[in-house]
Image (cartoon, rainbow, N blue to C red):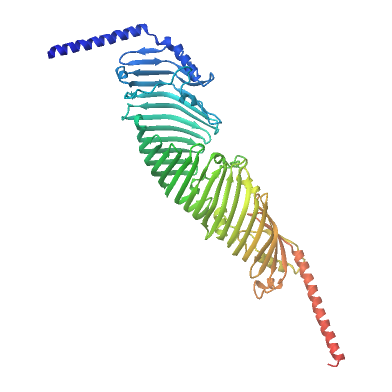
């Protein structure tokens, strides 16, 4: 009995196989898929208002699987004839028997030469929105849902291969354009509950901001559509980018990435970055975690690690995706920003002409929307050293505000605000109060030399607008006030000029001229001055400086844009001078010496007005002699009156 059953079974299977072969032969002989091309093209036009073009023949295959192969295929934009997407060739092969159990088993999908153009219009719509909407064919009922108890359609794909792909995204709403070229996508077995290897490679170019990079992604994918859950593990992303004036190498590792309908969670992230610039190489090594909410359109990430030799921890987030709005809270123990600045400018051109000044570029601010706080334990930037920096940052509408901004600076403190605006040309505004600052040390680090020493207070409230640093200096406007003690003004010695003046007064004294030097200085115990600034020129009318020997007043202009001085100083020897400053100054007690200072900051010229001083001395002598004669006359009249009265 068993042998007969086996015999009949084998005969039955052979009959079935025979029937399938006969059916395949009959279909191959009688069925021509190209007969259905017009119907397919018409259906796409009716349902999607797009033109489908299949100029070549459609080929069927039956062994070892049911397959369809096409040559060139293109699909137009919605409602017009412009090409939206095209492929050079497409092949899809299916296993037949699983279809009877509502299982789609695809042996492999191969696509070569995929090209697509996606547009995001100014109103936020995209050129592919209609592809995700239900078909709108008139008179046709919507697709019926699976009957109760009927298993949902399942999929099983042996692999996907896409080669030589190119995708262009034209974001007209934000004025950006992104191009992905030379792209390839490869996957392994894709099925519910199966971990599949996947890789993506390609070249990316973009503008605003500029990007020119090679991209490589590798990961394992786990898909579970029935539960609307997806997982990505062992993700490795590598980027090699060319930037303006530098190069970027970056890698990102995520051991696990959990995805569902509402969130994407990365419990552990490892990031490495190397940015090469003319000023040096910046290296970042960090680790942390991140959570992305697809429902609320928010991102939260925590990272900690090293920025070169600086330790940092940061909270970074996005409060919305479009337009992007960033939040941050960053703490860095120390950083030397000068390490990453470009070296000295290009050498002068032939003939001695200086290299043109590089324009300021604040274009990145125009699209930046961010808010957060920054804390730095120790900072050096543009030669200036600070500690305990605290700043709150807000960027929106092309403007960056740092307010409040505070730090410990050269044995004192600075507090205030700073604003940058990406206008055309860029605009700067600063309000700063420096308290108990060592002004000499600050100027030496900032400018390489110090023309003013002392400790005290400096108040600045200035604005400027210009395309370059020098243009900003020439456009500077606002006000400033200086209150210093126990310091010196370098470049000219007023006390020495007074001594020379006294020595020349014995003869016919002509005005004395010369050039000061950094080895000379005028000391003061206190100094106060306020300035009104316009077009890069600071004007002062109320200079007052005091020392044990002198009282100094003055007025004039300090041209910051041209680095020149045009100023008149009036130095008076104090009346209380007793035995100080030498016999020359003793003889000039109460006298005022006018000195005109002019010229570039590095070589200030001076002119001493001896004629005015001699005139004042002669006038004082006449007045003194008159007072003495008047006193003697009064004495004589008094004596005579006493004699007449008999007293």
Between residue 172 and residue 447, name the one nearer to us: 172
Determine the image quadrant of residue 499: bottom right
In the displayed orientation, state which residue is furthest to the front. 148
- Relative height, residue 188 to residue 591 (above, below): above
Q: Quadrant of residue 265?
A: top left
With 631 as the anchor, is 565 left or right in this view? left
Q: Is residue 405 left or right of residue 254?
A: right
Residue at horizontal 65 percent and vertical 60 percent from the top? 529
Looking at the image, the residue that sits furthest to the right is: 644
Task: Examine the rendered structure and indicate whether residue 311 appears above or below residue 73.
Answer: below
Q: Nearer the viewer, residue 282 or 342?
A: 282
* Res. 568 in view: no
Determine the residue positioned at 69% across, 69% down. 573
The one nearer the camera, 328 or 103, is 103
Q: Where 201 sits versus 276, above or below?
A: above
Q: Position of residue 607 (x, y in %)?
A: 71, 60
């Amino acid at each position: 009995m068993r042998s007969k059953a086996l015999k009949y079974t084998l005969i039955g299977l052979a009959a079935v196989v025979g029937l399938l072969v006969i059916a395949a032969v009959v279909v191959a002989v009688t069925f021509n898929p190209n007969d259905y091309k017009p119907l397919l093209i018409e259906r796409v036009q009716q349902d999607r208002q797009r033109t489908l073009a299949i100029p070549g023949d459609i080929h069927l295959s039956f062994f070892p699987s049911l397959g369809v192969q096409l040559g060139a295929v293109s699909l137009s934009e919605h409602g017009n004839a412009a090409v939206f997407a095209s492929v050079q060739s497409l092949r899809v092969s299916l296993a037949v028997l699983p279809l009877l159990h509502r299982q789609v088993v695809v042996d492999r999908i191969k696509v070569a030469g995929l090209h697509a153009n996606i547009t995001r219009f100014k109103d936020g719509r995209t050129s592919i929105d209609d592809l995700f909407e239900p078909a709108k064919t008139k008179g046709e009922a919507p697709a019926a849902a699976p009957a109760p108890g009927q298993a949902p359609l399942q999929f099983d794909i042996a692999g996907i291969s896409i080669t030589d792909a190119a995708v262009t995204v034209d974001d007209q709403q934000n004025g950006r354009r992104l191009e992905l070229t030379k792209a390839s996508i490869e996957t392994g077995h894709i099925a519910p509950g199966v971990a599949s290897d996947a890789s993506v490679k390609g070249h990316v170019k973009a503008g605003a901001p500029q990007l020119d990079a090679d991209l490589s992604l590798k990961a394992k994918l786990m898909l579970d559509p029935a539960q609307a859950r997806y997982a990505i593990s062992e993700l490795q992303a590598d980027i090699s980018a060319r930037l303006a004036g530098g190069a970027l190498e970056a890698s990102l590792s995520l051991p696990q990435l959990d995805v569902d309908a509402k969130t994407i969670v990365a419990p552990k992230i490892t990031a490495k970055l190397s940015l090469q610039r003319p000023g040096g190489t910046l290296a970042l090594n960090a680790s942390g975690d991140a959570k992305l909410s697809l429902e609320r359109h928010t991102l939260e990430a925590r990272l900690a690690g090293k920025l070169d030799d600086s330790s940092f921890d940061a909270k970074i987030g996005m409060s919305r995706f479009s337009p992007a709005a960033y939040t941050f809270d960053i703490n860095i123990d120390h950083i030397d920003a000068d390490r990453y600045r470009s070296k000295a400018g290009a050498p002068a051109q032939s003939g001695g002409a200086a290299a043109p000044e590089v324009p300021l570029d604040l274009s990145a601010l125009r699209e930046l929307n961010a808010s957060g706080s920054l804390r730095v334990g120790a900072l050096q930037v543009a030669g200036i050293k600070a500690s305990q920096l605290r700043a709150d940052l807000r960027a929106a509408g092309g403007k960056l505000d740092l307010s409040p901004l505070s730090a410990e600076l050269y044995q004192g403190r600075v507090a205030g605000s700073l604003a940058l605006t990406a206008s055309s040309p860029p605009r700067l505004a600063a309000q700063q109060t420096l308290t108990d600052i060592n002004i000499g040390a600050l100027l030496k680090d900032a400018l390489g030399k110090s023309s003013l020493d002392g400790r005290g207070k400096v108040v600045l409230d200035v604005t400027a607008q210009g395309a370059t640093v020098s243009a900003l200096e020439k456009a500077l406007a606002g006000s400033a006030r200086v209150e210093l003690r126990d310091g010196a003004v370098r470049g000219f010695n007023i006390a020495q000029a007074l001594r020379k003046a006294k020595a020349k007064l014995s003869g016919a004294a002509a005005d004395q001229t010369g050039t000061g030097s950094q080895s000379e200085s005028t000391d003061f115990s206190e100094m106060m001055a306020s300035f009104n600034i316009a077009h890069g020129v600071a004007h002062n009318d109320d200079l007052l400086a005091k020392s044990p020997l002198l009282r100094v007043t003055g007025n004039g202009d300090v041209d910051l844009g041209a680095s020149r001085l045009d100023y008149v100083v009036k130095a008076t020897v104090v009346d209380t001078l007793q035995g100080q400053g030498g016999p020359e100054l003793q003889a000039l007690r109460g006298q005022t010496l006018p000195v005109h200072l002019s010229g570039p900051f590095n070589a200030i010229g001076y002119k001493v007005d001896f004629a005015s001083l001699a005139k004042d001395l002669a006038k004082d002598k006449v007045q003194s002699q008159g007072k003495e004669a008047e006193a003697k006359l009064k004495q004589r009249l008094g004596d005579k009156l006493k004699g007449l009265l008999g007293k």
